[in-house]
Image: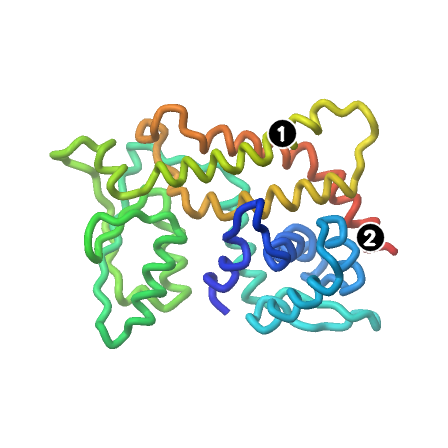
Amino acid sequence: MTDTDLADEVNVSAATARPRALIVSVYGLYAREVGGWISVSSLIRLMSRLGVEEAAVRSSISRLKRRGILEAERVDGSAGYALSSEARQILDDGDRRIFERRRATLAEGWILAVFSVPESERRQRHLLRSRLSWLGYGTVGNGVWIAPGHLEEETRFALERHGLASYVDLFHASYRGFADLHAEVRSWWDLDSLDALYRQFDEAHGPVLTSWRQRRRKDDEGEAFADYVRALTAWRRLPYLDPGLAPELLPRDWMGVRAADTFFALRRRLEAPAHRFVEHVRAR
C-alpha cells in the first residue's frame, strides 16, 4: 500500500463520500486510540448512523483489506479489522497537516525540488510527482517544483520514506524577481480551483455548524458523530492540496480561512459528543 492508495479513499467531496472514505475517517478518529482495531459489529452500527447499509460496509471492508489498509483480526473472540502498520503510520503523519493551521511567512522563503527521472523508471517518476502534489507543491517548470519553506522537513521525510530522495535535489530559495510574486504564485498553483473547493466545503458544512450552535436541547450524540465524520471526510484532503502560502500571497477574501474556521468550530462542538457515541457503541 502507498500513501496514494489511502489518499484515494479520502479524496472525495462531502456530497459523494464513498463508504470506504467514511470508514477510513472512522478508523483514523477512533481506532488508533484503542490499538487500531474495531469489531465488525461495532463498525456496522457506526456506519448505519452515516446512512451506510451493512452490505456496503462489508464490501468496503473487503476492498480496504485488498488494498492493504485493513487487516482481519479477532480480539476476544470477536471478528474485526485493524489498521495495517503502514496505514496507521500514514494517518499519524497526516494528523499535523489535517488538524493544524500552519501558514508560511514570506521570511521563510521557498523550497525547490529539482528532479530528473529516467524514462525507464516512469513508475518512480509518477510516484514522485504524486508525492510532491500531495505535499502541496506547485510547478515552476519541467522537473522544478516549489513549496513554502516550512514544508522542507515534511518533504525530506516523504522522499526518504518512499525511496525517492536519490532523484531529487532540494534547494532553499528566496524570490528575486522579475515578475510580480503574486502573479507567479497563481501560475505555480491553481488557487481558483482550491478556493472553489474551500467554498464547497463551507457551503456544505457551514449550515451544519449554525444548526448546532442554535440548539438548546441535549446533544444527539449519534447525530454529532455523523456530522463530525462527514465534515472530516470532506475536509481532510484540502490541507494536502493547500501549500499553506503566506497570507500576503493569497487572494483577497480567500475561502480557505472561512472554511478552516468552519471545520475547527465543528470539531470543537462535535468532537466530545461524537466520541461518547462511539464509546457507547463499543460497549454494547
Q: Mark 1 touching mark 2, by CB under 8 A?
A: no
Q: State how the image is colored.
A: rainbow
Amino acid marked by disc 1: Pro
Residue 57 lies left or right of residue 206; in this view the side is right
Circle 2: residue type: Val
State the image coordinates of residue 137 (x, y, percent, origin top left): 33, 49
Q: Which element carries disc 1, helix, strand or loop?
A: helix
Tell me what residue is drawn at x 51 percent, y 39 percent: 100
**Distance in Å between CA atoms under marks 1 and 2:** 27 Å
The mark closer to the camera, 1 or 2, is 1
Mark 2 sits on what residue? 281
Query: Is 255 above or below relative to 95?
Result: above
Quadrant of the image for the C terminus?
bottom right
Q: Nearer the viewer, residue 79 or 59?
A: 59
Q: Tag 2, which secondary structure?
A: helix
Q: Residue at x 27, y 47 (%)?
A: 146
Direction from residue 272 to residue 129 in the image, left or right: left
Residue 206 location, quadrant? top right
Q: Which mark is residue 207?
A: 1
How crowded pointer 1 is (Cα within 10 Å; few <14, some 14-19, many 20+) is rated as few
Looking at the image, which residue sits at the far right? 284
- Residue sticking out furthest to the left: 178
Q: Position of residue 223 (x, y in %)?
A: 75, 40
Q: Earlier in the sequence, mark 1 or mark 2?
A: 1
